[in-house]
Image (tube, rainbow, N blue to C red):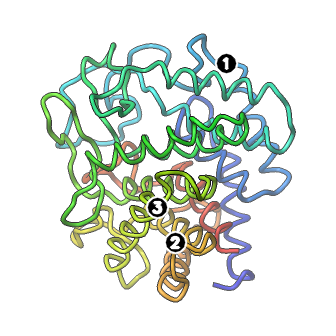
């Protein structure tokens, strides 16, 4: 897609995102901030800074950045927009790492400004995650086990946590955070990646060992692909597990590529053509492919057309107001309705920026 064709929809999408209510939405706010910073206009950066500043100002005593639940919430009554056939056996939860998505923007602003309060806030979020009781294999559960009564790993977590750990490692000169980024990705992959298809499932519960939601959900696979390439952007080449993570990323992309629909989209369940064509996962794959090419990890001849087709397909469902359509509503999964969301806007802006 030419830059001329992409500019107007991107500008509209950023403008629409800036009009949305982003307070109190935890990871959704985090992805929106990332998109605004990627788009990079003065208005978008200022909006992102305001959101980050409010999150820092409302950081709780445990270190979680603002906009996260500071009290137990009913699982899936919070943010669920539809009736689904799957559920967890736990009824109340406190998310451990959804607020960490805001930490990406916190560290971006630290890099831009050098303002120590951003690094201090990131340290609080990092230390909070270090305090969480883990699975037997070392995974940080998506919900606080002390409240939930179970330990579950969600593929969402790898994007919320792992790129944050990588950025924190550089900002704070904390090599252990690089180790944590890779460890969390690989532990989640151990439990959630299907060895036959190379695709990622949504949720795994440690005890009893099962998948309450085991489909190959597009956005879930997008979380994994985007997280891996962002870790690799900052992981030292001589890190002991660098090669293993490169292999994971490349193999995952190879599994995704043939599942792209002729329209340029991927389906909401990437291996099920009876499910709707879906924008957020499609954008995340475009982003991961473009960043993988940029880092020399993926073959441009093999992946660039796919990424361009994906971005072009979604551009066709950006309306006159800048709303990005065909986005599966939260928390995702097989029955999620297609709607317009702040994270769909954010991923459109990130995918467009990766194509520049």
Mark closer to the observer (3, 1): 3
Instruction: Give coordinates of residue 107: x percent, y percent.
Output: 71, 39
Q: Can residue 223 be seen from the camera position used here?
A: yes
Instruction: Give coordinates of residue 249: x percent, y percent.
Output: 43, 63
Q: Earlier in the sequence, mark 3 or mark 1?
A: 1
> In 3D space, how far apart are the residues under numbered discs 3 and 1 (Cα atoms)?
39 Å
Q: Residues within 10 Å of mark 3 (few under 14, many from 20)?
A: few
Which mark, by number, is residue 289? 2
Q: Is residue 137 above or below residue 312?
A: above
Contact between marks 2 and 1 (CB within 8 A): the answer is: no
Which residue lies at the image location 36% right of the left edge and 41% below the top edge?
A: 81
Q: Earlier in the sequence, mark 3 or mark 2?
A: 3
Front residue (pair 173, 9): 173
Please tell me whether mark 3 sits on a helix, a strand or a loop: helix
Quadrant housing the C terminus: bottom right
Contact between marks 3 and 1 (CB within 8 A): the answer is: no
Please tell me whether mark 1 sits on a helix, a strand or a loop: loop
Q: Which residue is mark 3?
A: 243
Mark closer to the observer (2, 1): 2
Q: Is residue 128 above or below residue 355?
A: above
Q: Which residue is mark 1?
A: 58
> In 3D space, how far apart are the residues under numbered discs 2 and 1 (Cα atoms)?
36 Å
Which residue lies at the image location 55% right of the left edge and 70% below the top edge?
A: 292
In the displayed structure, does residue 274 sit left or right of residue 308? left
Seen as rendered, the residue at the extreme bottom is 301
Which residue lies at the image location 72% right of the left edge and 33% below the top edge?
A: 172
């Amino acid at each position: 897609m030419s830059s001329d064709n992409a500019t107007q929809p991107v500008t509209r999408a950023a403008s629409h995102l800036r009009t949305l209510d982003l307070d109190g939405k935890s990871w959704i706010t985090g992805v929106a901030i990332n998109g605004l910073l990627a788009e990079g206009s003065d208005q978008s950066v200022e909006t992102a800074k305001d959101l980050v500043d409010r999150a820092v100002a409302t950081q709780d005593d445990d270190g979680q950045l603002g906009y996260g639940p500071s009290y137990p919430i009913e699982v899936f009554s919070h943010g669920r927009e539809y009736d689904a056939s799957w559920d967890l056996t736990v009824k109340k939860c406190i998310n451990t790492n959804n607020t960490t998505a805001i930490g990406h923007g916190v560290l971006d602003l630290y890099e831009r400004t050098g303002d120590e309060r951003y690094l201090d806030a990131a340290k609080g979020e990092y230390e909070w995650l270090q305090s969480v009781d883990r699975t037997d294999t070392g995974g940080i559960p998506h919900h606080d086990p002390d409240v939930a009564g179970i330990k579950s790993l969600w593929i969402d977590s790898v994007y919320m946590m792992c790129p944050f750990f990588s950025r924190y490692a550089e900002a704070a000169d904390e090599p252990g955070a690089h180790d944590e980024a890779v460890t969390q990705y690989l532990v989640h992959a151990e439990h959630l990646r299907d060895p036959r298809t190379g695709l990622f499932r949504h949720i795994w519960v440690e005890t009893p060992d099962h998948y309450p939601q085991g489909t190959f959900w597009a956005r879930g696979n997008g979380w994994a692909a985007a997280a891996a390439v962002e870790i690799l952007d900052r992981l030292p080449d001589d890190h002991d597990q660098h090669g293993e993570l490169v292999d994971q990323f490349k193999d995952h992309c190879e599994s995704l590529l043939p599942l792209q629909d002729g329209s340029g989209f991927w389906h909401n369940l990437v291996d099920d053509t009876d499910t709707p064509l879906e924008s957020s996962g499609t954008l995340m794959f475009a982003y991961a492919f473009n960043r993988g090419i940029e880092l020399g990890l993926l073959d441009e001849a093999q992946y660039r057309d796919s990424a361009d087709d994906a971005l072009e397909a979604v551009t066709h469902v950006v309306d006159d107001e800048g709303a990005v359509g065909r986005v599966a509503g939260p928390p995702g999964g097989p029955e999620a309705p297609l709607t317009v969301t702040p994270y769909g806007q954010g991923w459109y802006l990130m995918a467009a920026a990766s194509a520049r």
